[in-house]
Image (cartoon, rainbow, N blue to C red):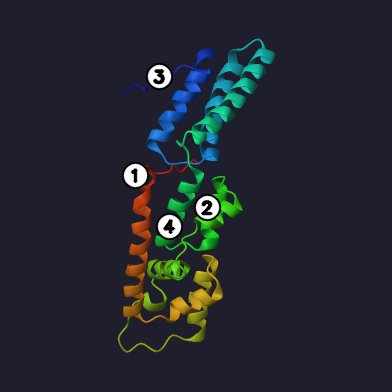
Amino acid sequence: MAIPASPPPPSASALDDAALHDAALAHLARYSTTQTGLLRVLDRRIDRWARARQASETDPDATAATIARARAAARALTARLASQGLIDDAAFAASRARSLTRAGRSRQAIAAHLAARGIARDAAGEAMPPHEDAEFAAALACAKRRRIGPFRRIVPDAAPLDLAARTRELATLARAGFPRSIAQRALACLPEEAETLLIALRQNLLDQNLLDQNLLDRPEPDSQ
């Protein structure tokens, strides 16, 4: 089978303002992102152009000047799209925080996730679900996924969980970023109560997320 030919390297025209604008809109049409995330995408496009150009360019000064102009244009474009409402870091953070809470991620883990996407600490804090039991719901979701606490497999006639086993379960939630008090509360919850509370709290977060359906419909690429 013949191997498809590699695409030709981008030309100088591939780095003009119009091309960067088209690349930005194409990305936003497919993915939810932040200003930092979109800027990373545009910078990678510029880097690819630079590598191809430097391999054949005899005037490195002209290439460097073009790259500098393109990076400045990418930053101006990102700021302009944000001012037009096409990028909304606050909405992204709130939607992602609720989704990750439902998935069983702690506030600590969510804050790290948002920070990696360029969300400031204060903005990340404001994005956290306001429901006072949201962290508890997340701990229950994590426990369910790991089959510990109220969701551990029931073995007939099995001996009660010993101290070492309880400590391991507590450590599992601690490594996930949950405070000790929340972890202990989640592990001590009765199975029926845990299921009922988990369903109710996750539905509450889902109802809030429906307000941001446009963000939920567009996944974030793993590369950001």
Q: CA distance from mark 2 to mark 1?
A: 19 Å
First along the sequence among labels 1 and 4 = 4
Q: Amino acid at mark 2?
A: His
Depicted 215 relative to depicted 17: above or below: below
Which residue is located at x 66 percent, y 13 percent?
62
Q: Which residue is mark 2?
A: 113
Q: Residue furthest top?
A: 58
Q: Answer with mark 2 or mark 3, whichever residue precedes in sequence.
A: 3
Instruction: Name the residue nearer the viewer: 53 or 17.
Output: 17
Q: Are marks 1 and 3 in contact (CB under 8 Å)?
A: no
Q: Which residue is mark 4?
A: 98
Of mark 4 and mark 2, the one earlier in the sequence is: 4
Residue type at mark 3 is Ala
Q: Nearer the viewer, residue 139 or 8?
A: 139
How far apart in space, not on screen, are marks 3 and 4 (Cα)? 44 Å
Callout 1 secondary element: loop
Q: Can you tell which of label 3 and label 4 is closer to the viewer?
A: 4
Mark 2 and 1 residues: CB-CB less than 8 Å, in contact? no
Return the residue at label 3: 5
